Image (cartoon, grey):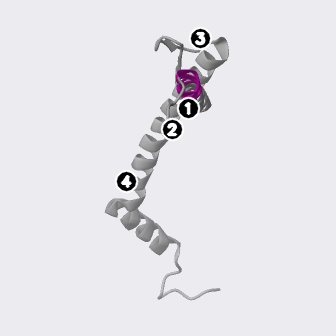
Amino acid sequence: MEFGAPPFVIMIVIVCTAGWLINNWIRAKHGYPLEDEWGGKTVKPDNGETLRLKAENKALHDKLDAMQDRMIVLEKIVTDRGYSLSAEIEALRDAPALGKERV
């Protein structure tokens, strides 16, 4: 039994091309640079929208970091023993005295 060279070569070319297409489709779907025919990478150029989104993302991260710092300070204030002690003293000042009668 003899295999003809043209059908075998054609099948290899089809399989390789299909693999290359599937690889590039997956890379494009997930935002990775695409491969060209010679193995080089084709990077999608950054446009103004991408730069704006990166700047906005950085600003939001900075704001979140500042809020976390403030939250830590507030937690320290609330869980501090001195804060609860002063709240108890203020509660005692507002409470009616035991020996005094109400009029």
Residue that carries the numbered disc 4 in the rendered image: 76
Residue sitting nearer the eye, 91 or 73: 73
Residue sitting nearer the eye, 60 or 75: 60
Q: Earlier in the sequence, mark 1 or mark 4?
A: 1
Q: Earlier in the sequence, mark 4 or mark 3?
A: 3
Measured as percent of width and height from the top left, residue 35 is found at 52, 18
- Which mark's residue is nearer the viewer, 3 or 2? 3
Residue that carries the numbered disc 1 in the rendered image: 60
Q: CA distance from mark 1 to mark 2?
A: 6 Å
Q: Secondary structure at mark 1?
A: helix
The relative height of residue 1 versus residue 75 in the rendered view (above or below) is above
Q: CA distance from mark 4 to mark 3?
A: 47 Å
Quarter in which the C terminus is drawn: bottom right
The relative height of residue 54 versus residue 36 in the rendered view (above or below) is below
Residue that carries the numbered disc 3 in the rendered image: 45
Q: CA distance from mark 2 to mark 4?
A: 18 Å
Q: Earlier in the sequence, mark 2 or mark 4?
A: 2
- Which mark's residue is nearer the viewer, 3 or 1? 3
Q: Secondary structure at mark 2?
A: helix
Q: At label 4, which amino acid type do we have?
A: Lys
- Which mark's residue is nearer the viewer, 2 or 4? 2
Horizontal side of residue 59 vs 48, given as left or right: left
> Is residue 40 located in the magenta-colored stretch of the structure?
no
Q: At label 1, which amino acid type do we have?
A: Leu
The relative height of residue 90 versus residue 60 in the rendered view (above or below) is below
Measured as percent of width and height from the top left, residue 95 is found at 52, 77
Q: Which residues are magenta?
A: 5-17
Q: At label 2, which amino acid type do we have?
A: Leu
